[in-house]
Amino acid sequence: MSSFYDEIGGHATIERIVDVFYAGVATDELLRPMYPEEDLGPAAERFTLFLEQYWGGPTTYSNTRGHPRLRMRHAPFAVTLAARDRWLHHFRAGLDAVQLTPEQDAQFWAYVQHAATFMVNTADEPSPDQASPGLTPTVRRGAGPVSEG
């Protein structure tokens, strides 16, 4: 029985999705500061390895980096709903750049939407008319180490 990874075209498909995604992130004023490395190449490589493993491909990600611990790895960053939406926008562009069947696209997109929402750890800053004097507009929640598995 073949894996979803194999069915969608394996490494070449995942790599294309990630390349298009990071091309968008590279110029995104909200997301780019969340990537401390000057070169996004290492982040793209890690993301490619993660997605390959998640969808039934090689286990290189876990072999080299251990358990994904997604929330823990993202905890240092203020991931807001706005950041999630920008992230999803760029990932959608990546999915649109490859030829998946409607069923494959729906399965991939459902996972990505769920995972992106799970990473949100900070409330969006309210607009000036919503802000209360003396209150910090950004509230972190769930930022401590969390194991997903």
Image (cartoon, helix red, strand yellow):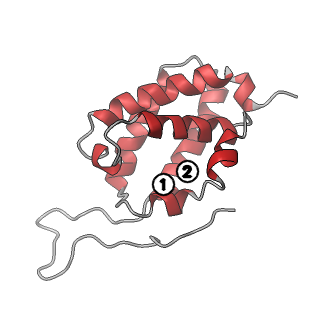
Number of numbered discs visible in the structure rendering: 2
Residue kind at label 1, given as amino acid type: Thr
Left or right: residue 59 versus residue 42 is right
Q: How far across and how far down the image is residue 69, in percent?
A: 59, 59
Q: Residue furthest bottom?
A: 134
Q: Residue at x 58, y 27 (%)?
A: 14
Residue kind at label 2, given as amino acid type: His
Q: Residue furthest front?
A: 64
Which disc is residue 117 wearing?
1
Which residue is more in the foreground, 12 or 96?
12
Q: Residues within 10 Å of mark 2 (few under 14, many from 20)?
A: few
Image quadrant containing the C terminus: bottom right
- Cβ atoms at labels 2 and 1 below 8 Å apart: yes
Q: Residue at x 36, y 72 (%)?
A: 140
Which disc is residue 114 wearing?
2
Secondary structure beneath dot 1 equals: helix
Q: How far across and how far down the image is residue 36, in percent?
A: 33, 49
Q: Is 133 above or below relative to 35?
A: below
Classify residue 39 by image quadrant. top left
Left or right: residue 14 versus residue 7 is left
Q: Residues within 10 Å of mark 1 (few under 14, many from 20)?
A: some
Q: Residue at x 45, y 26 (%)?
A: 19
